[in-house]
Amino acid sequence: MAVAVKTQNLPLIKKIRNIPREEYYVPGHRTCAGCGPALQYKLVAKAAGPNTIFLGPTGCMYVANASYLCTPYRVPWMHTQITNGGAVASGVEAAYQVLIRKGKREGELPNVIVMAGDGGSVDIGLQAMSAMMYRNHDALFVCYDNEAYANTGIQTSPTTPYGANTTFTPPGPAIPEGKKLFPKDPPQLVIGGHPAVKYVATASVAYPVDLMNKVRKALNVQGPTFLHIHAPCPKGWKFNESKTVEIAKLAIQTGMWILYEWENGEYKYQHKPREYKPVREYMKLQGRFAHLQEAHIAKMQAFVDAKLKAPGIPVAVPAPPPRAQA
Amino acid sequence: MFIIPKEKEVPLGCITPAPVTEQTMMITGNWREYRPVIDQEKCNLCMNCIVYCPDACWQLNEAEDEVVWNAKYCKGCLICVNECTTEALSKAYELDFEDGVVRLEKPF
Ligand SMILES: Cc1ncc(C[n+]2csc(CCOP(=O)(O)OP(=O)(O)O)c2C)c(N)n1
Ligand code: SF4
Ligand SMILES: [Mg+2]
């Protein structure tokens, strides 16, 4: 039995100047001006190239891109339910394996990429994503993290940071900080429980060359891979749309986001600042944190400090006691 | 057996043609309040506007010696102006004309 294996070796990009010119996510979509998720989509599509199939669980990168008969994807793309991006990717990959085995299709196995929001990957889409990784399908699962259920009007998700004002966590007299919980850690969730996964990385729209190289590395690997991409959302985080990249950079400079690769059990870090700025610098530009008091910002700083001591390794988060509100 | 005549067949709404260089059914250039303006003299082709535009509205020209702006789709987010390394990019209000300017008294 012939098993389709990838022989491709997408070359790594050395300099910003050498970024491929071809676009596979073209102009003409309804995402907000300055949309971080749209920017990462453009970069991922560019890095992956023409032999790619995208799967789009419900979220902004489906709804705002693919209204009615118009889509901006130049390569094949299919909508999936928000819950089942991983399951559809499994089916697509398995179908191509069979077609190649039966000699009904020639050439390389396509790059199967799920482009899921944070909700569509580590919350409502978690079981299908986990199953895809457990069954060892040759697909890349991208979680573009805009830290909220953005498309339905910015509701809190498990990656929404502590202290954020969302439509489900409005600050008020009883809960002055808005969101009380600290976020889930998506890459650690994947690394910790999926022995078939050999490559996991975090990326950011602020470092496009690093992002594209991680996409290519992930696609060159046989088997399931995972990328967690920081993608600021001007609408949801309430900042001026010209600051998307500036804010993404600040996230790295303050330690709110850490760029790393995990390959066969080893961690490697990228663009690590020599000195971290206080998290306040990152938070003060965003309306979603505007209501916070000093004590709340100090709590966030303590969380980040603990994370930076062991980057990439989950820290014990201060969880509220059960029924603290009652 | 019931057969739908060919001329009454409903096309599959869920299969859509893929665009090649642009999606002409969603032209977004009229969203802009401000537009980026380039001073080619100052531009050193750092590529930042090209890589950071979410709408792929900056591209190199064929000779690869100038960046070209796409007015038809640019939404005016101005990430490019913010990220330009040489101050070659600045912003201009869309509704300033030679014979007068238009301003909203109160943004809606
Ligand atoms: C089963 C189900 N529940 C709820 C919805 C409504 N819904 C549509 S988009 C969306 C938000 C998705 O959030 P995320 O995955 O983070 O993507 P984003 O919109 O932030 O890009 C939700 C809740 C749905 N489509 N399906
Ligand atoms: S709400 Fe956020 S993620 Fe959605 S299109 Fe707008 S900027 Fe992009
Ligand atoms: Mg989201």
Image (cartoon, rainbow, N blue to C red):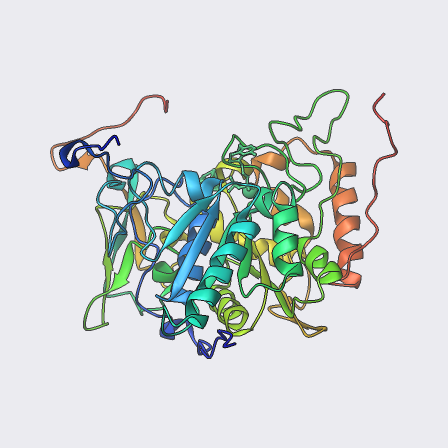
The percent position of residue A187, horizontal first and vertical second, equals 67, 58
Nearer to us in this view, B52 or A160: A160
Using the rendered view, name the quadrant where residue B98 is placed.
Answer: top left
Camera sees residue A312:
no
Nearer to us in this view, B26 or A289: B26
All told, the count of numbered labels is 0
Q: Is residue A314 left or right of residue A97?
A: right
The percent position of residue B67, horizontal first and vertical second, equals 25, 63
Q: Is residue A119 above or below residue A262?
A: above
Using the rendered view, name the quadrant where residue B89 is placed.
Answer: bottom left
The percent position of residue A26, horizontal first and vertical second, equals 31, 53
Q: Which residue lies furthest to the left in this view?
A: B99
Nearer to us in this view, B75 or A228: A228
Going 62% across and 40% down the picture, which residue do you hit? Answer: A124
Going 25% across and 30% down the picture, which residue do you hit? Answer: B2
Going 27% across and 40% down the picture, which residue do you hit? Answer: B28
Picture quarter with the C terminus of chain B: top left
Picture quarter with the N terminus of chain B: top left
Camera sees residue A182:
yes
Q: Quadrant of ligand 1?
A: top right
The percent position of residue B35, horizontal first and vertical second, equals 28, 45
Going 36% across and 53% down the picture, which residue do you hit? Answer: B81
Q: Is residue A184 left or right of residue B27?
A: right
Q: In this view, does A242 lie above or below A289?
A: below
